[in-house]
Image (tube, rainbow, N blue to C red):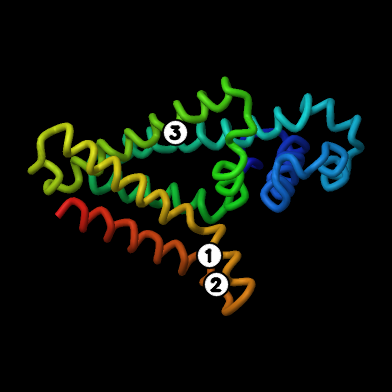
Amino acid sequence: MSVDQVTSPRRAQILREAARLFAARGFHGVSVDEIGAASGITGPGLYRHFRGKDAMLAELLIGISERLLSGGRACLAEHGTPSGQLDALISRHIDFALAEPALIVLHDRDLASLPDTDQRKVRRLQRAYVEIWVGVVVDAYPGFARESQPATEAQARASVHAVFGLLNSTPHSAAAGHRGPRPPGPDTMAALLRTLALGAFAAAGD
């Protein structure tokens, strides 16, 4: 689930380089000319594709929020049981986390650099994505049903956010690997994250 899959090759290249540079140096530490140079295009030529850095950041953060939400809805439609839906949600999110660590860094650090309207849109999309997970987790783990309905949803929502923190830790795992032993490969990391996520939900819903 990468920027390459949702836009033209040239725009995808620009967005990929913008995400890499923003993640490495911060949104305010990168110029349009530097993004253009990294993309093999002059600064003025870049404006034929984007009106500026703000538009790139908005497309990156809104775009991935839309894709996660769309993917979450697809998991519900394609799988008939809560356990199957949860497996699919976890797998899709792990694919994102391993493929797009720069976007995780951008969201954590630079969401506030977006205009208020775009920030609200990102947060609205993310809330809808979280609620998909909450509904599936409540159905998948009967232990949540022992609480009253508001308490059930609150506990499940807290569990979902905790698992997101776990799955979205991939940029930090990679960074740590540069200073020590090589981090696990993608397949090993995906299997580890899946095991940890399922274990966290099972513990919370016991």
Give the quadrant of the C terminus: bottom left
Rendered location of residue 85, percent (x, y):
30, 43
Q: Residue at x 70, y 33 (%)?
A: 56
Rendered location of residue 5, percent (x, y):
62, 40
Circle 1 is placed at which residue position?
173
Question: 59 or 3, which is in the foreground?
Answer: 59
Rendered location of residue 91, percent (x, y):
40, 52
Circle 3 is placed at which residue position?
126
For marks 3 and 2, give the CA distance. Answer: 29 Å
Q: Secondary structure at mark 3?
A: helix
Q: Is residue 155 left or right of residue 56?
A: left
Please state which amino acid type lies under the numbered disc 2.
Pro
Q: Secondary structure at mark 2?
A: loop
Find residue 100 and name its label. Answer: none
Question: 43 or 68, which is in the foreground?
Answer: 43
Report the mark closest to the observer, 1 or 2: 1
Please state which amino acid type lies under the numbered disc 3.
Gln
Q: Residue at x 58, y 76 (%)?
A: 182
Quick one: label 1, few (<14), some, or many (20+) residues within 10 Å? Answer: some
Quick one: label 2, few (<14), some, or many (20+) residues within 10 Å? Answer: some
Circle 2 is placed at which residue position?
183
Give whichever of discs 3 and 2 has the lower sequence position: 3
**Residue 83 higher or lower than 182, as above or below:** above
For marks 1 and 2, give the CA distance. Answer: 7 Å
Give whichever of discs 1 and 3 has the lower sequence position: 3
